[in-house]
Image: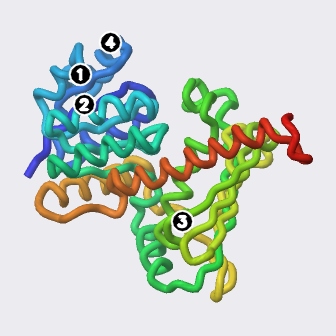
Amino acid sequence: MSLRFGLLGTGYWAAETHAAALDAHPGATLAGVWGRDPAKASALAERYGIRAHGDVDSLLADVDAVAVALPPHIQAELALRAARAGKHLLLDKPVALSAAAADALVAETEARGLASVVFFTNRFSDNVTEFVESAAGEGGWHGVRATLFASIFQPGNPFGASPWRREKGGLWDVGPHVLSQVLPVLGPVTQVTALAGPRDTVHMLTRHEGGAVGSFAVTLDAAPDAQTFEVVLHGERGWVPVPGGDRNPVEAFGAAVDRLLAQVEGTVGDPCDVRFGRDVVAVLEAAEASLRLERTVGVDGAAG
């Protein structure tokens, strides 16, 4: 089968990852694009030989599924609109900026029997998928130490001009990536606390069902020489690093399309569906709430 996709978004990630992967996929037809900037939508449509739609409803009427590459608060609204129109969903992380918005999306997709996949890039590399599945089945893990320090605000970085990334920071941008690898292994989160550090760093602790504890440090504004991406589980087997992905973003997105197609053809659910995306959002929202509390309470418990 071939699924007709509409692309919502016209930025760098939409053009260079979503559109490129959909255009190359044998089971997908990139049928149209909509964006908040009509000029960018027209340019992207011309590049891929597709139609630029002037409004979202026009695009939805012409497709079977949508791929969304928009800021998360806009994605949540338009993905819900697409689900209500009966369209399958291939979303970017995070699916929303609140668990309530993510819950609405889960309810709509499940009520309508729609396929859904959330694109956590490395979770669509075979080596990471195999590692996560194996680690989740072994047990005996005590926790994880993860440091994801990016430096996107340097000249030439295609993500540095993103207003939502500057506002929400590494917690919401790179945080979902690491949580997507950790939650299946350590289990659901029962408690979250977070502190803010220099250069917009967030330090987050998570307690999981069964007692494991996660320690995360994330930022998008690390000093260039401090950039690092490391996720290491620890437990009865000692310290075990989670591998980096073995696919580039376009290849990984193609695998995400494969998994959406598999659901449309009858496979029930996916490890990275909107319900899992909702669980990731709930952890991030709790961390953000903890940060707000930390900013108002001093060491001695008095208002800061």
The tally of labels here is: 4
Residue 298 position within the rendered picture, expressed as x and y whole percent measured from the top left = 87, 42
- Secondary structure under the numbered disc 1 in the rendered image: helix
- Secondary structure under the numbered disc 3 in the rendered image: helix
| Marks 2 and 4, the one that precedes in the sequence | 4
Circle 3 is placed at which residue position? 182
Q: Estimate how packed mark 2 is, as few (under 14), some (14 to 19) or many (20 or more) residues with alpha carbons within 10 Å.
A: some
Give the Cα distance between marks 2 and 4. 20 Å
| Left or right, residue 192 beside residue 76 | right
| Left or right, residue 147 beside residue 271 | right
> Which mark is in front, 2 or 4?
2
Q: Estimate how packed mark 1 is, as few (under 14), some (14 to 19) or many (20 or more) residues with alpha carbons within 10 Å.
A: some
- Secondary structure under the numbered disc 2 in the rendered image: helix
Quadrant of the rendered structure where residue 31 is?
top left
**Disc 2 + disc 1, Cβ < 8 Å:** yes
**Disc 3 + disc 2, Cβ < 8 Å:** no
